[in-house]
Amino acid sequence: MGVSGIVETLQYLTLKLEEEVFALDVAKVREILELTTITKVPQTPEYMRGVINLRGSVVPVIDMRLMFGMSRTEQTVNTCIVVVEVSLDDQAVVLGALADSVQEVVELDPDRIEPAPHIGTKLNTNFIRGMCNVDDHFVMILDIDTVFSSDDMASLAQAAA
């Protein structure tokens, strides 16, 4: 049983947050950066870790673990910033998503993708396009535009600009 809206085999970048594996459509990923100095911005939500300078552009960095109700991302050798381009109010906005590590790029057949369960997950399932079993573990496929679609995110992106 496939998920509506996912009709063709797509490539996804898998990443880890705590012990959970998530996937993003590679078309939304611009680049992956090693963790660099993040400048804190006063009076922003806790999940807004700050901003980075990306070749002269100010890019907000969001702690994905905090957005999903997990503990704060700690700096390790594998911690990285996944730079994504999302659509906010019909505008393309570049954001950095802090992740524990990136795993690999996988191709997922839409027939293998199941709808997200509504019970038994610690995440708001509105952000999850579907789930797929990859190498004997579940991967949650994020709808990255929905993850970053809240009013808070729109105001953060405007503030950083």
Image (cartoon, helix red, strand yellow):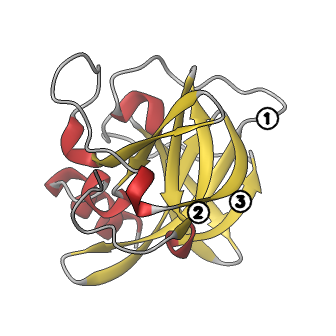
Q: Residue at x 19, y 45 (%)?
A: 126
**Residue 18: x percent and y percent?**
56, 21
Q: Residues within 10 Å of mark 2 (few under 14, many from 20)?
A: many
Q: Secondary structure at mark 1?
A: loop
Q: Amino acid at mark 3?
A: Ile
How many marks do you count on the picture?
Answer: 3
Name the residue that disc number 3 marks: 32
Q: Residues within 10 Å of mark 1 (few under 14, many from 20)?
A: few
The quadrant holding residue 96 is: bottom right
Q: Secondary structure at mark 2?
A: strand
Q: Amino acid at mark 1?
A: Asn
Name the residue that disc number 1 marks: 78
Q: Are marks 2 and 3 in contact (CB under 8 Å)?
A: yes
Name the residue that disc number 2 marks: 83
Q: Nearer the viewer, residue 13 or 151?
A: 13
Q: Residues within 10 Å of mark 3 (few under 14, many from 20)?
A: some
Q: CA distance from mark 2 to mark 1?
A: 15 Å
Q: Nearer the viewer, residue 4 or 87?
A: 4
Q: Nearer the viewer, residue 124 or 131?
A: 131
Q: Are marks 1 and 3 in contact (CB under 8 Å)?
A: no
Q: Amino acid at mark 2?
A: Val
Q: Secondary structure at mark 3?
A: strand
User: In the image as oriented, which residue stretches furthest toward the bottom?
Assistant: 91
Q: Earlier in the sequence, mark 2 or mark 3?
A: 3
